[in-house]
């Protein structure tokens, strides 16, 4: 089969499109003929050796794939060849065939496209966990979403609206702000003069929850914009800058700074993770949420697609299509 392979940690351009042996499903594993593969910001960090974990090289990057079951390994009874599924893996998704633990494979509704299924995994899964478990966002609260036009940001906007929050999104261009509004944001603001804008939009009260996958200078603005008992979610650092926090802001605001590590949640709370997926799937089936696919590319162009995400050029989810390569 064809796959994108990382032979050594380094620039994204070092990924190689080549032939590799087909995976064989082991005990409690499912082999999937991939029809859509999700591209995520952490994929780029992993390839560069900048992520929280490292794999022995060579390896195939990629965390999410959707398609049909090709075969199942010993011990698997809940899936059979031909089933429509989506899977989360630690690595191996940038390929025409993907082997995944059965516990990380989810049956798809017939109405759900494969690309939407990929979108609902990492990006939407992260935003959902952040707002449900970490922030405990409530209907009627105000949610601030930084990096609003990225796949995770758009997910946070849509999920926040599904929960019943008022959503203030922040994005760097007019085009991106328009995408935030299309996804349901009540207000879309630029980063310029953001502190004053947030005071104006909240009547000086501040925001109840801030979702920050960006880091950098905007993090301090968010910390200063928290309402009493507010929750500032540390999701990631797409700006490339890990910010520092003046602890007196937490004291004065009586706010909380809450880490969001979705991978740890998936590993440590599998039942809650499965329940989150059920809610996302139900929302999608019912039309409560709608994903936004930015672009689709063939597997051979995975490196270019990933670089575009790292350069913050994508608006929504990027999908790789492996069939026919």
Image (spheres, rainbow, N blue to C red):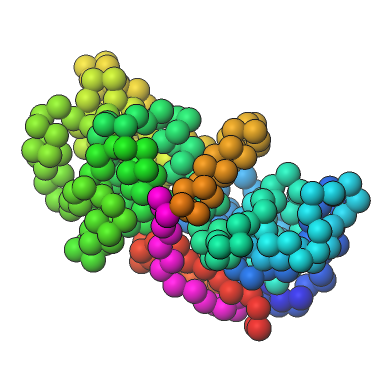
Q: Could you tell whether 269 is left or right of 234 in the image?
A: right
Q: Image height check: is 110 above or below 254?
A: below
The x, y position of residue 118, in whole percent, is 56, 59
Q: Residue at x 37, y 56 (%)?
A: 150
Q: Taking 10 as reference, is 164 above or below it?
A: above
Q: For this view, does 53 lie left or right of residue 185?
A: right
Residue drawn 45% across the image and 30% down it: 134
From the viewer's perspective, is residue 206 above or below residue 177?
above
Segment colored magenta: 287-301
Residue with the most extreme right position: 74
Residue 297 colored magenta?
yes
User: Residue 32: where, in percent of width, then height?
Assistant: 74, 63
Toward the viewer: 85 or 13? 85
Report if residue 75 is visible in the image: yes
Left/right of residue 168 with respect to residue 291 in the rendered view = left
| Residue sitting nearer the eye, 223 or 319 | 319
Say whether residue 11 is left or right of residue 250.
Answer: right
The answer to whether residue 190 is magenta is: no
| Position of 22 relative to 183 (above/below) | below
Name which quarter of the figure residue 17 lies in.
Answer: bottom right
Image quadrant where one finds the N terminus: bottom right
Picture coordinates of residue 99, whole percent (x, y):
76, 58
Specify the quadrant that holds the C terminus.
Answer: bottom right
- For this orientation, the residue located farthest to the bottom is 324
Q: Residue at x 25, y 34 (%)?
A: 142
Tell me which residue sits at (81%, 64%) in the image. Answer: 81
Q: Is residue 65 at all visible to an observer of this figure? A: no
Q: Position of residue 72 (x, y in %)?
A: 84, 57
Figure label count:
0
């Amino acid at each position: 089969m064809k796959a994108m392979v990382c032979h050594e940690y380094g620039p994204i351009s070092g990924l190689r499109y080549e032939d590799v042996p087909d995976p064989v499903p082991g005990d409690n594993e499912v082999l999937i003929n991939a029809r859509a593969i999700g591209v995520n910001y952490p994929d780029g960090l992993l390839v560069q050796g900048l992520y929280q974990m490292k794999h022995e090289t060579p390896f195939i990057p990629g965390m999410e794939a959707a398609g049909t079951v090709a075969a199942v390994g010993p011990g698997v009874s809940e899936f059979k060849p031909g089933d429509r599924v989506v899977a989360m893996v630690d690595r191996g998704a940038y390929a025409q065939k993907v082997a995944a633990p059965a516990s990380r494979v989810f049956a798809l509704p017939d109405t759900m496209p494969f690309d939407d299924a990929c979108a609902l995994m990492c990006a939407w899964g992260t935003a959902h966990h952040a707002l449900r478990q970490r922030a405990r966002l409530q209907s009627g609260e105000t949610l601030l979403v930084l990096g609003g036009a990225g796949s995770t940001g758009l997910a946070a906007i849509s999920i926040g609206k599904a929960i019943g929050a008022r959503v203030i999104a922040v994005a760097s261009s007019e085009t991106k702000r328009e995408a935030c509004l299309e996804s349901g944001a009540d207000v879309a603001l630029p980063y310029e003069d953001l502190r004053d804008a947030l005071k104006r939009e909240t009547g000086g009260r501040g925001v109840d929850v801030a979702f920050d996958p960006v880091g950098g200078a905007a993090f301090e603005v968010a910390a200063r914009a928290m309402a009493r008992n507010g929750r500032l979610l540390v999701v990631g650092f797409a700006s490339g800058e890990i910010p520092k926090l003046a602890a007196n802001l937490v004291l004065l605001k009586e706010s909380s700074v809450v880490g969001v590590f979705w991978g740890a949640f998936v590993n440590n709370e599998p039942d809650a993770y499965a329940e989150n997926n059920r809610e996302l799937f139900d929302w999608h089936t019912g039309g409560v949420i709608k994903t936004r696919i930015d672009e689709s590319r063939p597997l051979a162009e995975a490196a270019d697609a990933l670089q575009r995400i790292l350069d913050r050029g994508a608006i929504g989810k990027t999908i790789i299509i492996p069939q026919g390569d």
